[in-house]
């Protein structure tokens, strides 16, 4: 654990320093949050808060990730060199999703609206990264196409033609779910940090060093960012951060061959996504709303819950879900 702690602390320190440099630049460039008029009225006061804070995560992951890759690649032991090689796809996919989010955020800011990239273009970008990562896992790293069935403690082997679409679906669904969860100061960062910790623990248990290293980098990055993202937030992550974090979670789960565990671990993001689907479907059929507003964290917000309470309760639920998930491996 000492090894993982050092990486977490290193990433936290780098994230903190990068944030101190990036946030003033974002303020100077007037890269401010654009709140939806139909959103909670209490959020209008957040208008102008620096956004695209996911850039802090991208820079931190690149700095610490490259440092760790170089450190392992310098080793004479071939198994240590392989860890460096295996880290590259994980880092690449995560940064790839972050860049798509960055383009989306820039589009919103340049156009001075909350629309961003056209859904088709955004989906195409996410699809390209997802397919690329899936092919890398199966064709370059040769980790296999078997999927672990949690709690039953068995695995099923999928044919390659079925595994690729399944892996792509996992990545698209996860990034979308984390993106929807990002709507309250510190919510998405806190929940993601807990899920990443659980996935890293699995990596430690199974002795998968690259997951342990990558997960530790992400945990430290989230904790450093969270210092500036807790209510009242000094910076918002934007789609740059939410898509990056969603991609990171999905990449780790697929690498571990345990994407089905995300149904339990990421219960809050799953519920956030379902709340939107239910609301849209019900409104189209009846013209009435099931929730006061979706994603569901806004429903609780409009019901009188303070932002800090929502973050605390949702994080506690995620912690419990991750503990249950760990019992299923």
Image (cartoon, grey):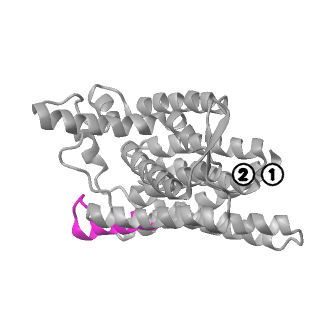
Residue 211 visible at all: yes
Report the side of 191 relative to 17 (left or right). left
- From the image, state whether disc 1 or disc 2 is nearer to you: 2
Question: Residue at the spot x=82%, y=65% of the render?
Answer: 80
Q: Give the answer, above or below, for where 43 lies relative to 27.
A: above
Quadrant, the N terminus: top right
Where are the magenta residues, as a range? 99-116
Q: Marks 1/2: CA distance?
A: 10 Å
Residue furthest out toward the right: 76
* Residue 180 forms part of the magenta stretch: no
Report the side of 275 relative to 319 (left or right). left
Label 1 close to label 2 by CB (< 8 Å): yes
Residue named by callout 2: 212
- The residue carrying pointer 1 sits among few (fewer than 14), some (14 to 19) or many (20 or more) residues within 10 Å by Cα, namely few
* Quarter-of-image position of residue 79: bottom right
How many marks are shown on the rendered structure? Answer: 2
Q: Which mark is residue 3?
A: 1
Quadrant, the C terminus: top right
Q: Give the answer, above or below, for where 154 lies relative to 85.
A: above
Front residue of 201/307: it is: 201
- The residue carrying pointer 2 sits among few (fewer than 14), some (14 to 19) or many (20 or more) residues within 10 Å by Cα, namely many
Q: Please provide percent x and percent y for residue 115.
A: 24, 60
Question: Residue at the spot x=57%, y=38% of the render?
Answer: 261
* Residue 105 forms part of the magenta stretch: yes
């Amino acid at each position: 654990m000492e090894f993982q702690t050092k990486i977490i602390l290193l990433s936290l320190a780098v994230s903190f320093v990068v944030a101190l440099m990036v946030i003033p630049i974002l303020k100077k460039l007037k890269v401010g949050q654009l709140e939806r008029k139909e959103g909670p009225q209490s959020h209008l006061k957040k208008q102008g808060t620096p956004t695209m804070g996911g850039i802090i995560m991208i820079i931190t992951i690149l700095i610490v990730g490259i440092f760790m890759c170089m450190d392992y690649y310098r080793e004479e032991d071939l198994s240590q060199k392989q860890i460096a090689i295996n880290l590259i796809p994980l880092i690449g996919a995560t940064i790839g999703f972050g860049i798509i989010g960055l383009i989306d955020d820039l589009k919103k800011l340049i156009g001075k609206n909350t629309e961003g990239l056209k859904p088709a273009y955004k989906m195409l970008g996410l699809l390209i990264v997802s397919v690329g990562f899936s092919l890398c896992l199966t064709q370059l790293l040769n980790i296999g196409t078997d999927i672990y069935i949690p709690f039953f403690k068995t695995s099923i082997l999928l044919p390659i033609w079925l595994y690729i679409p399944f892996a792509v679906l996992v990545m698209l669904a996860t990034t979308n779910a984390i993106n929807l969860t990002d709507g309250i100061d510190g919510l998405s960062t806190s929940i993601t940090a807990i899920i990443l910790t659980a996935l890293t623990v699995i990596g430690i248990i199974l002795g998968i060093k690259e997951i342990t290293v990558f997960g530790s980098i992400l945990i430290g990055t989230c904790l450093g960012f969270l210092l500036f993202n807790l209510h009242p937030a000094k910076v918002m992550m934007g789609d740059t951060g939410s898509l990056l974090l969603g991609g990171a979670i999905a990449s780790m789960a697929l690498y571990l061959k345990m994407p089905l565990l995300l149904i339990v671990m990421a219960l809050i993001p799953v519920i956030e996504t379902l709340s939107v689907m239910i609301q849209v479907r019900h409104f189209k059929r009846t013209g009435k709303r099931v929730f006061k507003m979706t994603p569901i964290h806004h429903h609780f917000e409009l019901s009188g819950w303070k932002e800090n309470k929502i973050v605390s309760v949702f994080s506690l639920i995620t912690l419990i879900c991750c503990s249950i998930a760990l019992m299923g491996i």
